[in-house]
Every structure is written in C-alpha cells, then in structure tokens.
Image: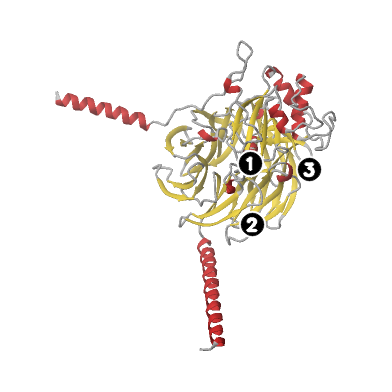
Amino acid sequence: MNGKSYLRTALFVIAAVFAMVAVGIGWNVIRTSRSAEGHSLAGVLDTKGRVVVVDLDTGRVLKQWALRSWAFDIAADSSNRTFVTAQSGGADVDVDDKVGIVPAGNLGRVEYVTLRKPNPGGVEVVGDGTVLVDHGLDGKDGMYVCLVDTNKRKVIRDGRVRDLNVPLRVVDGIAWASCASLDGRRSLRMMNPLKLKSEEVLAGTDFPVVETSLRGSLYGWLISEPGKGSIARFNSRTGAVEASTPVDLEAGAGRIVSVRGKLVAADYSGDDLDACGSNLLVFDPETMRLVKAIRVSGGPCDIAVWRDRLVVCNYHDQQLLVIDPVSGRTERRIQLPKMIELPFQVAVVD
Amino acid sequence: MRHTNFRFAAAIAAVSIAITALPNPAIASPKVTKHLNSDGSIPKQWNLPTPQLASDDTTPEAAGGDGDGRNNISFVNFDNGDFLCAFDGALSSGHSGIWKDSLYTGSTSYCVWSANTTPVKEVLRERANKYQGYDYCYGEWVPGHTASGLAVVNWCAAQAGEPYNIASSKTDFTQWYCSKLVWAGWKVKAGVDLDANGGYWVTPADLVNDSESSTFAYGD
C-alpha cells in the first residue's frame, strides 16, 4: 500500500471509531431516556446544590446535575415529570433568585426561572406545572411567597404570609403556613395557594405544622420547642386540633408521610448534624399511638412515598433506601454517586 | 434444677427481647442556657478557642483543603441576641445574622435576622440552616449581657425592610449590611461595641474577634 492508501485507511478507521462512540453514546442516552419513561423516579438534593435522579423501579442512578447555586428544597411534579428546586444561593455575591426545573423525564438540561425576589427557601407543587415558592424576606406585610408556572417559565403571582416561619406545606390543595410572631405567638394559617390569600385558623404557644393527610384528616406536629412535640390530627376544613399525643423524639420532628393506612415520621433534626437521628416512627392514625420504630442508621433526614413503600434519604450514609413500612425491612439500598454529598431532601415522580 | 435454670434463662431472654423491641425512648439533648461562672469568668464550653481565621483552611476541597462549602454548626444552644458569623474562605467577606429564639423550632426556621444584597437590598429574616452552607461558622454570644439579648434582636428585627448598603458608615442607621445590623443592635440596646478594630466598617470577622464576644459553637 502506498502513503495515500495508508492515510485513507487511517482516516476510515478514525471515522469508524468516532461513529461507534457516537452511536454508543446515543444508544445510552436513548436507552436511559426510554428506561426512565414510565418509571418512578426519585430526585435527591444534597447540601451543595447537586441533584441526582434515581430510577426506583430498577434502582439505577440515571443522572446527576450540579445546580447553579445552593438549593434549599426540591419538589416533584409528576404532571410534567420534573423536579423543581428552590435556588437560594448564599449571601453577597452568591445570592440567587431562581427555581430550577430538573427534567427527570428526558434527563436534559436544567432550566431556571427568575423570581422577583432572592433567596427562595421552599417549593411545593400546587397543580400541574404550578409551584408555590416561599422566600426568607419579611416585609411589613409578612414573608414573601410567589406562584410560578414552570411550563411557561414565569412568576404569575406573588403575595405575603404574615409571620411565616418555616417552608409552606401544600396538602390536599391547601397551603398550610406555620407561623411565629416576634412576640412568641405561634399560629397556623390556611392559604389558597392559587390566590395567595391566607387566614389564621389556629393560635397558641405550640408551633403547628401540617404534614400530610389520611382518610380526610390532616396530620402533623405541635412543636413546643426544638426536639419536643406531639403528633397531631387537624381538622381539614378548619385546621383545629382534633387530637394529639406527645412523642418521645430522639432528634426532632421531621417529615411525616402517610402510607398503607399509617403515618410515618422521620425522627430527624438538622439542629445538630452530628446527632441527626436514626428512627422512622410509625403511628396508628386512629389512636395516634406509636406502633413501631424502624431503626435506620445514617440519619434518615427525609422520606417520601413510592406506591406502598417508603423512600428514605440517608444523610450520613449517602444512600437512598426503599423500606417496607409494615415489616420495617429495608428492601433496597441505592448508593448515591460520589458527587452527591450529604443528601438531605428527596422527592418522587410517579 | 435443669428445668428451673432453663425457665429462668428463657425468662431473661424474653425480657431482653421485649426491651430491645420497644421503640427507643431516648429524648433529644436539652438546650443549656449559657451563663457566667460565679466568679465572673466564662465557662470553657462557652468560650471556645477561636481558630485564627487567617490560618483556617480555605482551600477548596478539590485542592485538598477544607473549603467544602458546608459546616456542621449546631443550633441547640443559641439564645436571643446570639449571632452567627459564617465564612467561605475570604476573611474580608463572610455573613452574619442575629438569633431570635422564639422563632426557632428547628433548623429550617426563619429565626435569624440579617441584611441581604442585590437584587433586593433589605433587612430580612433567614433560615438557620442557611449558615451551614458556608465553609465554617461561629456561634457567638456576649457574656455578661445576655439579659439584653432579646431587646437587641428585637431592635434588629425592627429594621426589617430597610435598605442594604455595604458602603454605609456604622453610624448611618438608615442603611444596613449584615454585620453592621448585629453590631448596631448590641451597641444601641446594650452599649456593647463589638467592632474589634473600630474601623469605618464592622465585618463578620470583627464581630468574632472582638473581646466582648465569645465563641460557644463552631462548625467546620
């Protein structure tokens, strides 16, 4: 073979290699996207503003992203198969004013919607493609909140919630605001999340937090002080406390979910990250009594429901666990990738 | 005898199993109120050695340092008027906020008053766990003046909505930045000057280094 033949052969080989790599990559993307379609996905947020999507049906880690800034919260919107993040950022030059839209369905690029105020702290899905965002901005009329259309990528309304003190919770279409005033008065406000108008429904010395609903009733906490509280049942129309039972907490009053007719609470506190808790507490909603404590090592900092299972985000172990709430058995441990550190929030797209 | 021993052992085993099967009734660590010793000195646990800010490792983690962008400061023992000073390496920057205890029910509570920057510049409330998002963070108190803590933080809260201006002088009480808000609250309501070097500006590092403040919590 002469020089030109060698050159043609070499170029052909190089081109063939590139073609194979391109097809291989394309195949992986297609295969990953196809495998994500129709599957339940967990979105896990870590303390450094990174998110990873896990296919719960297969246990595979699908993709991870480094978000543009530190995010405080993540919510799941099954209507458009996205996770939405509250991009708070830090202070000074690090401050941010966005919500992130993480495309769990097609695993594409994260897009951002610019908000009217900075430092969003919490995000809750209120409807198809609509999220409610609260910020740590306390004006004379209360803490700033806004409604964002993630499909249209814009803020559609904003408002204020007097004395709002922790991120809002949206349960059965109503936003519940746990409030604390400067003079120590604690209260619960009920808000139409689409109109952003709220009214006070409960007041006292304990801090009321609505977390979930079950069989027409609302359940949550009455917190007397950090690490101490009672599990409570609230009237879904009026917010009045119908029943409550003190709970011995090892760490603190964390997220409560309802699954298989029971209430499951994360005994978790972010107050001391070296001792953040290790129990999931299972309660009977009729008697409000503790029926089981599921010991989970590694700090179960957030829980979500996937069909009739618990999805548990483990802070120190860097794992996602799938747990049977009845037997307490851990059915699957999904090790999160190295890039994810100290995961503290999980949401599920079903 | 053998039957008796067996029944006894079985009973012990049954009791042991029953005890271990019970939900763990351990109670969360209680908060401890900070105070001075009877001779006026500060107890050691409320007067932690303050790492020299200049020597603390600010190298990003990827380069082998401790600058990992987060810290594990505990909020358990914070009281009214205590303040947080958090840093991401550069000593000339950092962020401060002052604690309001009745607003605190957990790490996601908006219980810290501070001043924020662009695009909206104003005095506002921040979440406690926001301060865990820096390389390191100090929890500071003002020993001997804890009785003024509530008045101090309420005064800071009363500035809510007022504008932010990093270039404003310490004596201009119409504009704020984070560490100035903390400094002014203690100056106005308790007569305590927390500016370590007495300059035009008071930085978060000044608040930490001042002789009238002590470190009771630290996260790295």
Q: Amino acid at mark 3?
A: Val
Where's residue A206, x and y in %? 61, 27
- Subunit ID for the residue under disc 3: B
Q: Which residue is mark 2?
A: A110
Please give the name of the residue rendered at 72% of the width and 19% of the height, measured from the top-left corner: B148
Q: Which residue is mark 3?
A: B120
Q: Nearer the viewer, mark 1 or mark 2?
A: 1
Q: Quadrant of residue B83?
A: top right
Q: Nearer the viewer, residue A169 or A103?
A: A103
Where's residue B184, x and y in %? 78, 27
Q: Secondary structure at mark 2?
A: loop
Say whether marks 1 and 3 touch (CB < 8 Å).
no
- Subunit ID for the residue under disc 1: B
The crowd level at tag 1 (other Cα within 10 Å; few <14, some 14-19, many 20+) is many
The crowd level at tag 2 (other Cα within 10 Å; few <14, some 14-19, many 20+) is some
Q: Secondary structure at mark 3?
A: loop
Q: Amino acid at mark 2?
A: Val
Q: Nearer the viewer, mark 1 or mark 3?
A: 1
Sequence order check, earlier mark of 1 and 3: 1
Q: Quadrant of residue B211?
A: top right
> Quick one: which residue is furthest to the front in this view?
A3
Q: Are the residues under badges 3 and 2 in a single subunit?
A: no
